[in-house]
Image (cartoon, grey):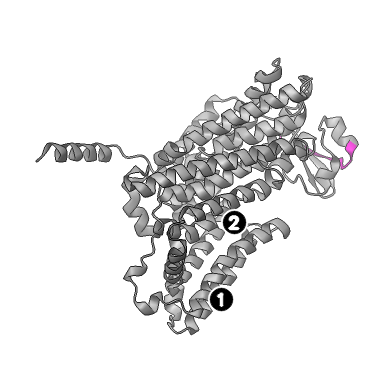
Amino acid sequence: MSTDAAHTSDRTRRRRSFSVPSAFTILFVLTILAVFATWVVPAGAYSKLVYEGGQLSLTQPDGSAKSLPATQQSLEQLGVQIDISKFTSGAINKPVSVPGTYERLAQNPAGISDITTSMVQGTIEAADIIVFILVLGGLIGVVKATGAFESGLVALTKKTKGHEFLLVLVVSVLMVLGGTTCGLEEEAVAFYPILVPIFIAMGYDSIVCVGAIFLAGSMGTAFSTINPFSVVIASNAAGTSFTEGLAWRVGGCIVGGIVVIAYLYWYSAKVRANPEFSYAYEDRETFARQWAVSPGDATAEEVGFTWQKKVVLVLFVAAFPIMVWGVMSQGWWFPEMAASFLAIAIVVMFLAATGRSRLSEKELVDAFSEGAASLVAVSLIIGLARGINLVMNQGLISDTLLDSASHLVAGMSGPLFILMMLAIFFVLGFVVPSSSGLAVLSMPILAPLADTVGLERWIIVCAYQWGQYAMLYLAPTGLVMATLQMLDMKYSHWLRFVWPMVVFLLVFGGILLVAQVLVYGA
């Protein structure tokens, strides 16, 4: 054996000797750690306020509840500086923490059985998004069975030859805009099946796919301008208007969008020039088998872009703008989105059963079932991640962490105060990975701290956005693990790619926050 061959063999053996845990294993370990935390972190809770049945319902830390008139006076007596219309209009529909009501409670540690129970319960609570993902998988399976993907890919690759990055650019810009305006994140899972085969055909890897969709969308959401699930609900809970600080967020979104696109351009160019540069190069064959479409293996008739295949592709692509329209203007959520995808799948099945390349009823049903089955693992990942949050909430430690954070910044002032708030939201983003959930839990507690140091409350909202989303690029408790599972990408490969964007968001966000303090501080 030659020296070079021996070295290659040694490197291969070392790579195989160290296997990065799968998403399931990482979440299982985190569940165990969460259970352990319920034994060592003191239990406690804030009173929670929610609007229901025409009245305000106040639940005390001990679990007792009472009803209050839905008036501004009731909120003022509780020290909740939020306009009552935000509750009555439904703008705030989750329990809000009441300032100054934190109480230590008897420890409520989780047991060994809670490790598996929380996984099951988290999956049950995620049933709506799980059904959506399974229906999406079924739709993909049916469209693949018609051969429309292969035909469309042949036509597209001919038209984009020499301008491959243009698609990455367009997708990234649209995802940044979708993130900043409507928080397009969990729904973005639906875009991978249509875009990933195209990216593969253009010579890119799995990381470019996740970067153009998840990373770009999250960058837009980090600099939310009018996103109702982030900046709007956080501003409402902070007792300020989302229009305050809008110019800063618009400017930040433009800079953030340019940075993420430039980063994708650099990485994409490197991968196209030398595929071995890919951070996920060792998994390229598995990734290609799962997602690549190989028109070269099809017959001329199959590749032929018949009118039926064109209609099928139009219907498939139309499902996504319809979904965005429904979310933004009709109040759709995952059940409605799943129903719309199912309706399109049924129409596609009808076309496939009556077209020239007629498929039997059994073939179509099998294609739908196999497509749904291919995304079962992704669905379960989402449920397991939610199970971790359930353990911490039921162990009564989430509010303790929030209370500790509020005391941590006491006595600070100016730039140090706001940078510490950025760090606090970065940590809380792991504990509460939901943007709206963290907003209603933390804003009523942390936003009033701005008053004590002479800052505008909207600056705290900015710290919440930039701190939490820097964490959500990384947090296994958030959407990232489901995304990586969908594309069979190792978490270590993603970390290698995304850490510069985490640093950028924290550093750039910190600079903007300090500038805001200097301009608007007392």
Q: Residue at x 53, y 80 (%)?
A: 350
Residue lying at 61% horizontally and 44% vertically, measured from the top left: 220
Identify the mark nearer the N-term, 2 or 1: 2
Magenta-tinted stretch: 63-72
Q: Which mark is residue 76?
A: none
Q: Quadrant of the C terminus?
A: top right
Look at discs 2 and 1 and give the one toward the viewer: 1
Location of residue 53 in the rendering, given as x and y in whole percent from the top left corner: 82, 50
Q: Name above or below for residue 196 compared with residue 297.
A: above
Residue 409 visible in the displayed image:
no
Residue 225, horizontal then vertical, whole percent: 70, 43
At 57% from the left and 33% from the top, the residue drawn is 505
Residue behind mark 1: 347
Please tell me whether residue 68 belongs to the stretch shown in magenta. Answer: yes
Residue type indicated by callout 2: Asp
- Image-quadrant location for residue 305: bottom left
- Res. 258 image quadrant: top right
SS of the residue under disc 1: helix
Foreground of the two, 393 or 336: 336
Residue positioned most to the left = 1
In the picture, residue 389 is in which quadrant?
top right
Q: Is residue 472 above or below residue 375?
A: above
Front residue of 493/402: it is 493
Q: Position of residue 405 (x, y in %)?
A: 64, 24
Residue 128: mark in rendering: 2
Mark 1 is on which residue type?
Val
Quadrant occupied by the N terminus: top left
In the rendered structure, the answer to whether residue 235 lies left or right of residue 113 reads right
Q: Position of residue 19 (x, y in %)?
A: 32, 40
